[in-house]
Structures are given as structure tokens and as C-alpha cells.
């Protein structure tokens, strides 16, 4: 497949798309809750993947997926940079005592909670939790201070903890 994609073969490109579109769509949706915008970013990500496939360097199992994920995340971040990302002061919660257990919360519910976070909180949360970036790298990538990154992560966690508590209350858990 890699050889076919690298050669620009439509069959290879289709196979790559079919294999990874669902996963990359979920990655992009973590950053961009608007479905239409997320679809546009995903399309641009695949165009970039196909155009730049010759520059991909295989470094072992998972390297292709990681490379494509980085392209998709960069596309989502580029889209977010076009918006002014501000903190939603009205929704600032107190800091949670600890991270809540989420194993009993359906994945779709958790995803919706994450998508409901203000843009800045959601972006930092995703980069820290899912992309496993340190605050220094997040700050550099987003053009913010390292302290701001840490603060937004804490606030995102607090909002999510409150949402989880409310969800459990509604569902008698």
C-alpha cells in the first residue's frame, strides 16, 4: 500500500483513506466540534498526506499513523488559530481535588463533554492528554505562556469533572 500511495496510485490512496479516515476524523473532532469544519480539515489533511507521502520516513510500527495524526492535529490547530481563543470566565470552576474515574462513562458522552469545552481549554486538554505533549511544547505551538497552558488544562479538567458529576447525578450512578 505504501508504495502505491507514494506513487500517487488512486487505489493505494483509497486504501489508506479507508483504513485511517475514521481514526483521523475522531482526532480532528476532538479539537473542532463543528462537524462541517472538521470534515474540511480532514479533507485538507488527506490532501497534505497524499502530497507529502514521499517525505514520510518509516520508523517502525505505528510511525505512519503517528505521522498522519500529526498532520491532522496541525490542520485542526491551524483552523483554531484563525479564531480568537479566549477563556470563558463565566464557566471557570474551582479546581477539582482529583481526576474523576471515567471508565463507567460511555465514550460518546465523554467525547461530547470534551467537545463542549471552550476552544482554548479543549485544545490544551487534547494536546496534553491525547498527544502527550508537555506544557512547554503546547505553549510554543499555541503561542501562549507555559503557565497559561497548565492553567487551561486544570480548568478543562475541572469543567470535565463537574460535567461527569452532573452526568452521574442524572443517571443515578
Image: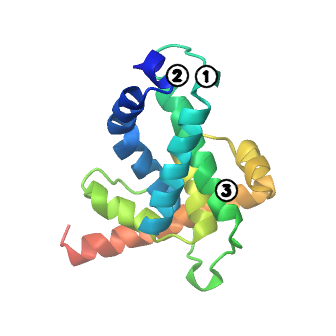
Left of 109 or right of it: where is 163? Answer: right
Residue 158 x/y as whole percent: 52, 67
- On screen, 38 above or below 69? below
Marks 2/1 in contact by CB < 8 Å: the verdict is: yes
Numbered badge on residue 6:
2
- Real-space Cα distance between discs 1 and 3? 23 Å
Closest to the camera, between mark 2 and mark 3, is: 2
Task: Residue 134: give x, y in percent of width and height.
Answer: 67, 41
| N-terminal-most mark, 2 or 1 | 2
Above or below: residue 133 compared with residue 85: above
Q: Secondary structure at mark 1?
A: helix
* Residue found 74% across the figure and 49% down from its top: 141
* Mark 2 residue crowding within 10 angstroms, few (<14) / some (14–19) / many (20+): some
Contact (Cβ within 8 Å) of mark 1 with mark 3: no
Element marked by disc 2: helix
The residue singled out by tag 3 in the image is 78
Please give the name of the residue rendered at 24% of the width and 54% of the height, measured from the top-left corner.
104
Residue visible at 39% across and 26% down? Answer: 12
Q: Quadrant of the C terminus?
A: bottom left
Do we see residue 65 in this rendering? yes
Q: Residues within 10 Å of mark 3 (few under 14, many from 20)?
A: few
The answer to whether the residue labelled 2 contacts the one labelled 3, judged by CB atoms less than 8 Å apart, is no
Query: What residue sits right under mark 1 in the picture?
Result: 54
Q: CA distance from mark 2 to mark 1?
A: 6 Å
The foreground one among 139 and 153 is 139
Residue 106 numbered tag: none
Q: Is residue 47 left or right of residue 23?
A: right
In the rendered image, residue 145, in percent from the top left (x then y), is placed at 81, 57
Amino acid at each position: 500500500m505504501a508504495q502505491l500511495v507514494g506513487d500517487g496510485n488512486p487505489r493505494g490512496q483509497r486504501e489508506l483513506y479507508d483504513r485511517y479516515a475514521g481514526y483521523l476524523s475522531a482526532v480532528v473532532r476532538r479539537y473542532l466540534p463543528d462537524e462541517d469544519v472538521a470534515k474540511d480539515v480532514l479533507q485538507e489533511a488527506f490532501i497534505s498526506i497524499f502530497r507529502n507521502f514521499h517525505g514520510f520516513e518509516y520508523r517502525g510500527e505505528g510511525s505512519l499513523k503517528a505521522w498522519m495524526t500529526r498532520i491532522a492535529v496541525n490542520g485542526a490547530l491551524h483552523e483554531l488559530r484563525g479564531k480568537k481563543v479566549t477563556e470563558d470566565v463565566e464557566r471557570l470552576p474551582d479546581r477539582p481535588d482529583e481526576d474523576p474515574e471515567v471508565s463507567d462513562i460511555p465514550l460518546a458522552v465523554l467525547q461530547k463533554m470534551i467537545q463542549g469545552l471552550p476552544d482554548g481549554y479543549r485544545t490544551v486538554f487534547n494536546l496534553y492528554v491525547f498527544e502527550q505533549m508537555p506544557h512547554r511544547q503546547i505553549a510554543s505551538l499555541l503561542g501562549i505562556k507555559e503557565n497559561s497552558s497548565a492553567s487551561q488544562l486544570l480548568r478543562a479538567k475541572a469543567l470535565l469533572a463537574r460535567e461527569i458529576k452532573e452526568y452521574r447525578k442524572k443517571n443515578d450512578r
